[in-house]
Amino acid sequence: MKTNFIKLFALLVFAGFTSCSSDDDSNSDPVDEVTNYLPLSVGNYWTYDVTTEGVTNRDSLYSSNDTLISGVAHKKFKTLEVLPYGFYSTSLKNNGLRVDGGTVKMSGAASFDYGLGNPINISISNFVILKETAALNEQLSAVTGTFSQTIEGYPLDFTYTLRTVSDGQVASFTSPNADVYSDVIKTKVILNLKITTTQSIGGFPVTVTILAPQDVVTSTQYYAKGIGMVHTNTNITYQLQEFPGVTLPFPSSGNQTQQEFLDTYVVEE
């Protein structure tokens, strides 16, 4: 059950990071811009070794085709795997990316059924995943909202904030697998969650907070100039509150770290 509950948080942020409502710039003319830190040209591809709890798998991510989302030109990203293993590849899968004034914005739609309840859907628009001139700790994008799900008979109400924050730039970065890259931009993706449930205690409905607001997902992504994303470190952690008379089908805490390492790539600007 521990792995499944951690997977709940992981898929929640994947869905939030990759789904979209309408594009705010739907009246803009398509502009073919480029960014050196995430080249978007159709045909570009990257393969990653993904290590989770000592197990390594492989993802293949590529820019598939041009597409219009609300009248705005995007590059659609796909993966060879039906269900990619890594946080980053899952985030970009089947979504549109575009460059806008030195930023990379993501739009799309995604729904994930993780096996514990109904699929999660969160809407975002023009979500900035990279900004070339961002200052350290500058917030790039944020989206907040609520939704409800029943998991194993428990009605749960979620309040979320999903945001991206600049983690600065470094002239040289040595990945944990010893690969060295020059001129690297770092972006953090952070999911903050609060979860409440309403239970009958002593014959009366009582709403309790089972997860106080906390950052349950923090993913740091490293983008190298002329290459794209070269390394991602994602930590998923939570600590539930305990209440007499309320027994949840989840462990009271969890922690999981995943690392993604660039293996091969072919890019054109």
Image (cartoon, rainbow, N blue to C red):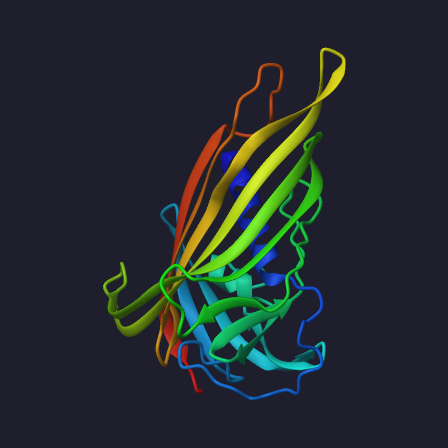
Which quarter of the figure is the C terminus placed in? Answer: bottom left
Q: Is residue 232 visible?
A: yes
Q: How many marks?
A: 0
Q: Position of residue 155 (x, y in %)?
A: 71, 32
Q: Is residue 220 above or below residue 238?
A: below
Give how far across and how far down residue 186 sits, in percent: 37, 64
Relative side of 144 to 240, left or right: right
Q: Nearer the viewer, residue 37 or 151?
A: 37
Q: Give the quadrant of the N terminus.
A: top right
Location of residue 53 (image quadrant): top left
Q: Quadrant of residue 264?
A: bottom left
Seen at 50% across and 28% down, the residue is 252
Foreground of the two, 231 or 146: 146
Q: Give the residue at x 51% y 41%.
A: 6
The residue sitting at 48% across, 52% down in the picture is 190
Q: Is residue 19 left or right of residue 63?
A: right
Q: Is residue 86 visible?
A: no
Residue 229, compared with residue 123, is above or below; it is below
User: Residue, x 44% and y 71% (percent of image)?
Assistant: 131
Residue sticking out furthest to the top? 202
Where residue 104 sits in the image (x, y, percent)?
51, 74
Q: Nearer the viewer, residue 67 or 22?
A: 22
Q: Is residue 153 above or below residue 243?
A: below
Could you say which is closer to the camera, residue 129 or residue 121?
A: 129
